[in-house]
Amino acid sequence: MTSSSGAPGGRLPLPRLLAFSAGSIPGYLLLGIMGVYLPRFYVGHLGMSLLQVGGAIAIIRLADLGIDLVLGILMDKTKTPIGRYKPWYLLGLPVLILAVFKAFNPPVDAGVSYMMVWYSLLYVAYSLVVLGHSAWAGTISGEYNERSRIFGWMMGLALAGSVSVNLLPLLTSGAINPAKSASIPTIGWIIIGASLITIPLALLFAPEGKIPVAKKETTSIKDYLAVVANPSMLRLILADLFLTLGPGTTAPIYIFFFHEAKKFSLVEVPILLIPYVAAGVFGAPFWGRMAQLLGKHRTLQVACVAYAVTQTILMVLPAGQFLITAIGMASVGFCASAFVLLVRSMVADVADQLRLETGQERSGVLFALVTMTQKFGTSITISIVYPILAMVGFNAKDGAVNTPYAIWGLEMCYLFAPILLVLVGGAMFFGYSLTAERQDEIRTQLDALRAAEEGAGAESLLGHGESIPA
């Protein structure tokens, strides 16, 4: 039996699922380093100001906004013997290697222009790897619950990769520490090594589902506007933006907050990220399973409320208390792990809906839209938060001593925005209509269309005197 996407029905065997899901590690490993450690590296080690780094990243993001859509359109139009999305995912490997090598090993006199060039290529690499992998994932199965399982494992293994980086201070007795500028080149080589292993692994052992033939081959601007105007997709775009902005607000000031305000050492700071990320490794499959019981949109709303509660508790914990802070970080990370995986799984459902309604394949464009919101959300926060820190007089240089007023400004930036933004994201799903029941109806109709296409193809072969194998 085939799914609506033409991919094999039923559950993807666990070995193949693990091989495929491991392919998500490079992109999200890169995103985490770019969000938490790399900006501080350019500020603290190379001497750039908070305003310079924040402004440079804002310019890069504005210039980069259209890249994901262009890539999504090109992916949807691609036809190769190995599939639509696999070639683009593979192309991301050499781009990622070059960008990481240059961005993580800047010369001592590197300026803002150097950062902008190679940071831009980092985002291109991220787009190729994450967008190609996510769109590919949407073709593996058309089953509503199986998609939750696939995206849950993808996010779980991606977070497991991040845990390994934050474990390095413990595993190396402090010799490699992503919070210290001297370790950033080594972290770059680790990302490159992980990419050389996991990307080929996914390509070799996981299938790409066969997409039904499009009823409409030509595409106009109106067609693409209709994609964005689709009610379900519009909700997902807005929700994904707010759900990215929430946790994303804390990422660029994470080291500053826990070192300066919570009084943890630079050895302890990356270790505190371990329970946050590790909890997501278990949280992602949990939320995927929960979605099978409650539905994806309801599960997301539950996760949003739980995030607000746990983030509030984390903020009121006393400074310098490592154990209870680690528990608090784990609870927040467990809740936050639901956001990306469920939104991506719901995007694959919208792709089925549009495939039925329009006869066109739009997975690449749809995933490009949410990849774009994630990139924009995680980077624009730097451009907002860093100028605020500069306004309150926060000094981000290595070894600087800050005033109580500057620390207060840092705490305010870390406290309120994440909770408010995540709750707004959850509110976007009130009235969401693409439920499991509706998705089952869509999949049934797509299966019928595909069966009709295959029957027509068989009749055509018989009409030309060709035999059909039993």
Image (cartoon, rainbow, N blue to C red):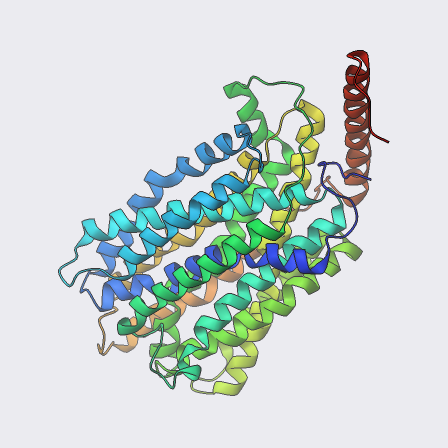
Give me the residue at 24% from left, 60% from top.
50
Q: Position of residue 246 (x, y in %)?
A: 49, 57
Give me the residue at 30% from left, 59% from top.
386
| Quarter the C terminus occupies | top right
In-image side of 448 versus 215 (left or right): right
Q: Position of residue 262 (x, y in %)?
A: 40, 80
In-image side of 301 versus 269 (left or right): right
Give me the residue at 58% from left, 29% from top.
227
Q: Position of residue 461 (x, y in %)?
A: 77, 17
| Quarter the N terminus occupies | top right
Asked where in the image residue 381 lies, by quadrant, the reply is bottom left
In-image side of 396 versus 382 (left or right): left
Tally the numbered discs.
0
Res. 313 visible in picture: no
Q: Position of residue 220 (x, y in %)?
A: 52, 18
Q: Residue furthest left?
A: 109
Residue 356, compared with residue 25, is above or below; it is above
Asked where in the image residue 49 lies, by quadrant, the reply is bottom left
Viewer-proximal residue among 394 and 357:
357
In-image side of 129 versus 458 (left or right): left
Res. 72 visible in picture: yes
Viewer-proximal residue among 94 and 174:
94
Give me the residue at 57% from left, 74% from top.
330
Residue 107, compared with residue 135, is above or below; it is below
